[in-house]
Image (cartoon, grey):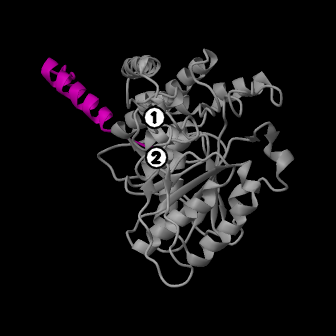
Amino acid sequence: MARRQPCPAGFVCAVKNIYIYLNKKKTLVLTCSAQRPPSSVEVEDPSFGPPSPRSLKDKCELHLLEEGPSAKAELTREQGLRYYRTMQTVRRMELKADQLYKQKIIRGFCHLYDGQEACAAGVEAAINPTDHLITAYRAHAYTYTRGVSVKQVLCELTGRRGGVSKGKGGSMHMYAPRFYGGNGIVGAQVPLGAGIALACQYQGNNQLCVTLYGDGAANQGQLFETFNMAALWKLPCIFICENNQYGMGTSAERASASTDYYKRGDYIPGIRVDGMDVLCVREAVKFAADLCRAGKGPIVLELQTYRYHGHSMSDPGVSYRSREEIQEVRGKNDPIALLKEQMLSNNMASAEELKEMDVAIRKEVEEAAQFATADPEPPLDDMCNHIFKNDPPLEVRGTNPWSVLKSVS
């Protein structure tokens, strides 16, 4: 029997390099879940075709839909690193805001987003930069994902001139191109979002509006009025309920006769997915965006998520829930830890690489905080800037062209 010849060292080295290259090019194929992180992760071999899709009916909860989002969510290395950076930056930014608030450098209202990072990252990954987005008062993360820097966000929180709203908006009133805030009245942004979607439809630009609200706002009457109009006019609007389980200090079960928020549109299709998994969020929003762009009207998504902080900085967050409950979610279902585990277990990135990214993000946030505390406050003369009025009409009857908005100052 012939003896097996040993492989040349050069051949072994070449095979090793090819293996490393393919690992870096791997694509994760994940099964999305409506309730908890995926229990299994498959890695697609680049030399073979993609695995056959599997129905999401047993994984996604659907309303008035025969088919839901793709059963397989593919993740490239580049995408994974981008999502990880986004979520980790939001987490560090919010923790820094918590620290600055306790130091009384940030004052007034302040609603933090840590724990819900997968929602913001997944939504932004699924829509186009030219699409529109409006949310409630828990707006820091979406301000960042829509293109505003950490420095501008922290400057706004500290009331400094370098803030995105020149230091006059604070935590609840941040804006960016195609991002409409940041709205302080519970649920008031929902009809505004439908109005933005109406503008997209009227202009025929194939754009849409993502309109976000919480489980507490889901009981507002103006939501149902908006749903009715959006359905009648088939507006390209994705209504997203970020169900973080508590409206201020009231659990969803105590406030809502039905906690199936994705069915609240009644005659509008709906989907409920795991809001702690960035890929599940991305796939659901992609599906919703395709439906809107096809002219099929609005859709309601419910993202089941969890906030680690209290409702606002004035709420310790432990009078209506236990510390053990919070720690259990952190330990078992943290969105950043979930993505990190998926990437590490499938050789998408090394622990050292992600650690280096963490260090860089911490440095970026710390430098932004130092700038925000040193940046001057806006001068008193700026108080009345950016306030606009319309000239009163000269006559009651007749047609007058709309007057140009003029600054009071």
Residue pointed to by mark 1: 381
**Image point 52% across, 67% down: which residue?**
392
- Say which label, 2 or 1, has the lower sequence index: 1
Relative depth, front residue between 383 and 190: 383
Q: Is residue 262 left or right of residue 351?
A: right
Height in image: 169 above or below 329?
below
Of the residues tagged 2 and 1, which is closer to the observer? 1
Q: Please identify the quarter of the rendering in which residue 81 is found.
A: top left
Height in image: 201 above or below 162?
below
Relative depth, front residue between 322 and 5: 322
Q: Is residue 124 left or right of residue 261?
A: left
- The spot of residue 116 in percent (x, y) is 59, 37
Three-letter amino acid code at the position of disc 2: His
Height in image: 240 above or below 228?
above
- The spot of residue 93 in percent (x, y) is 50, 26
Tell me, for residue 192, which label it has, or none. none
**Image point 77% across, 55% down: which residue?**
219
Name the element at disc 2: loop
Three-letter amino acid code at the position of disc 1: Asp
Q: Which residues are magenta?
A: 1-29
Residue pointed to by mark 2: 386
Relative depth, front residue between 368 and 205: 368
**Image point 37% across, 69% down: which residue?**
205
- The spot of residue 189 in percent (x, y) is 61, 55
Name the element at disc 1: helix
Mark 2 crowdedness (10 Å alpha carbons): few <14, some 14-19, many ≥20: few
Height in image: 129 above or below 40?
below
